[in-house]
Image (spheres, helix red, strand yellow):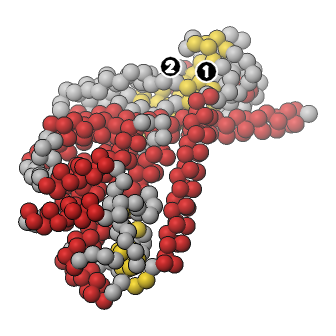
């Protein structure tokens, strides 16, 4: 009977452990995504500020580079490297410290009770916003995937009406490929009706061009599409779609997607018209106005545009070319990197703590020791509980009593040297028993600051053998 009870308790423990790990994973991921979105939004806001300041001299290539930099902050999980970033800041700015508010502690309870704890009331179950965010994010992802599937079907259907391009057009395309140093194989397809030229495809890029243009116009159109392929604009648009799926609750990502689509066209226009005369610019502008604007799909890079506002901006930049000093562009990029990294430096790993009135439901390890067996420790390091209730043991055996486990950064001039090991915390019960919890963590050997705590196990004694 006792064995049956123990196995039942062990099964409940495993279920609780898996549930806790799932909640912890969701909370940590949502916290990391939040900091990534904040960093990316700061970069995008600075982009608009710089665009307002240098609106008469900002080139499209400069704007496109800043937007790609903002995309990096939305995509790269820099919060994982928050401790490294803080140490770099302290290396270059001695005496500087990042003041961090105590991190938010998520308390999850598996029972159907409400507990009044010193940290406030604890309600059972998962947070509703986490569940709703997961559902909404899944729906957004499905919509985006469905849109790409429809685009794929449209392109496959269109390929039935396409033919090989004339020999003269193929020779022009090969000459432009050599001038741009493009070594990839690019298929040139011909549509026998007036339509906006466009390119699509990542592994095997294709350019679709229609009839009805003069020789110089064909060269301009092909050059524009080749620059889309060389700049990787098709990949950039796919990444922009992924950013929307990842940060769907952040309204700034929709502005980013709109700006990416617009500036990619402006940048290609700028590349094509580099070194062109005023007459050639006029010819290119008229070609842009007269061509059929409707693109085949939203994922393809089309020469024309449906938006009058975008068309007006493209014509303005064609008529009045811009020049940007390299010093200004480098300065703007450096400011964006520095300012967007600050939220990452303030990130602390999220901890999920379990609280329940029944200790049997909140432990990963059980010890049923008799009152006479006070020396039967499950861990040799328990001897240190005779001197303190909290200590840290590194992998090489070094011990630190009463380490700094607070979540507030107060270390000023300390250039940390961290070592990995286990953190032990001990607490006694009113009935004479005790519980200690073990965390895997890192400790600074200079100031005893503990970071990166991860729950390992909990041990309970019917009667405390440590004091």
Most foreground residue, 466 or 423:
423
Mark 1 crowd level (few <14, some 14–19, many ≥20, 10 Å Cα)? some
Residue 458, horizontal then vertical, whole percent:
63, 30
Which residue: 45% across, 61% down?
Answer: 297
Vertical side of 328 occupied by 391: above or below: above
Most foreground residue, 118 or 432:
118
Please report contact status of discs 2 and 1: CB closer than 8 Å, yes or no: no
Vertical side of 300 occupied by 248: above or below: above
Residue 40, horizontal then vertical, whole percent:
34, 40
Q: Answer with left or right where residue 406 lies relative to residue 429.
A: left
Which mark is drawn over residue 466? Answer: 1
Residue 20, horizontal then vertical, whole percent:
64, 35
Which residue: 67% across, 14% down?
Answer: 115
**Picture quarter with the N terminus:** top right
Point out the residue furthest to the right here: 1
The answer to which quarter of the image holds residue 165 is bottom left
**Picture quarter with the C terminus:** top right
């Amino acid at each position: 009977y006792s064995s049956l009870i123990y196995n039942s308790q062990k099964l409940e423990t495993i279920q609780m452990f898996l549930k806790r790990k799932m909640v912890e994973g969701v909370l940590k991921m949502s916290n990391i995504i939040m900091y990534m979105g904040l960093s990316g939004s700061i970069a995008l806001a600075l982009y608009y500020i710089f665009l307002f300041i240098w609106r008469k001299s900002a080139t499209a290539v400069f704007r496109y580079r800043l937007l790609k930099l903002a995309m990096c902050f939305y995509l790269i999980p820099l919060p994982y490297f928050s401790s490294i970033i803080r140490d770099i800041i302290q290396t270059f700015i001695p005496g500087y410290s990042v003041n961090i508010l105590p991190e938010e502690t998520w308390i999850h309870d598996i029972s159907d009770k409400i507990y009044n704890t010193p940290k406030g009331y604890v309600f059972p179950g998962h947070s509703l916003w986490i569940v709703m965010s997961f559902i909404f994010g899944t729906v957004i992802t499905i919509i985006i995937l469905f849109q790409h599937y429809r685009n794929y079907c449209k392109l496959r259907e269109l390929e039935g009406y396409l033919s090989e391009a004339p020999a003269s057009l193929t020779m022009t395309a090969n000459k432009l490929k050599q001038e741009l140093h493009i070594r990839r194989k690019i298929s040139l397809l011909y549509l026998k009706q007036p339509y906006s030229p466009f390119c699509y495809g990542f592994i095997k890029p294709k350019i679709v061009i229609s009839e009805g243009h003069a020789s110089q116009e064909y060269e301009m159109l092909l050059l524009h599409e080749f620059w889309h392929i060389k700049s990787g604009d098709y990949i950039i648009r796919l990444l922009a779609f992924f950013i929307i799926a990842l940060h769907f609750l952040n309204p700034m990502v929709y502005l980013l997607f709109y700006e990416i689509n617009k500036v990619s066209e402006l940048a290609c226009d700028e590349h094509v018209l580099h070194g062109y005369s005023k007459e050639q610019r006029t010819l290119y502008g008229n070609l842009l106005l007269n061509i059929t604007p409707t693109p085949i799909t939203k994922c393809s890079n089309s020469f024309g545009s449906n938006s009058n506002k975008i068309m007006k901006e493209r014509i303005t930049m064609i008529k009045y070319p811009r020049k940007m000093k390299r010093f200004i562009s480098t300065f703007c990029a450096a400011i964006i990197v520095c300012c967007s990294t600050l939220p990452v430096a303030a990130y602390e790993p999220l901890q999920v703590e379990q609280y329940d009135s029944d200790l049997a439901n909140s432990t990963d390890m059980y010890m049923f020791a008799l009152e006479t067996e006070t020396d039967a420790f499950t861990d040799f390091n328990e001897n240190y509980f005779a001197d303190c209730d909290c200590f840290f043991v590194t992998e090489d055996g070094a011990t630190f009593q009463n380490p700094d486990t607070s979540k507030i950064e107060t270390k000023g001039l300390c250039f940390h040297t961290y070592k990995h090991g286990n953190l032990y915390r001990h607490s006694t019960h009113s009935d004479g028993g005790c519980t200690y919890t073990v965390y895997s963590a890192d400790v600074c050997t200079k100031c005893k600051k503990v970071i990166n705590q991860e729950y390992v196990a909990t041990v309970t004694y019917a009667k405390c053998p440590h004091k």
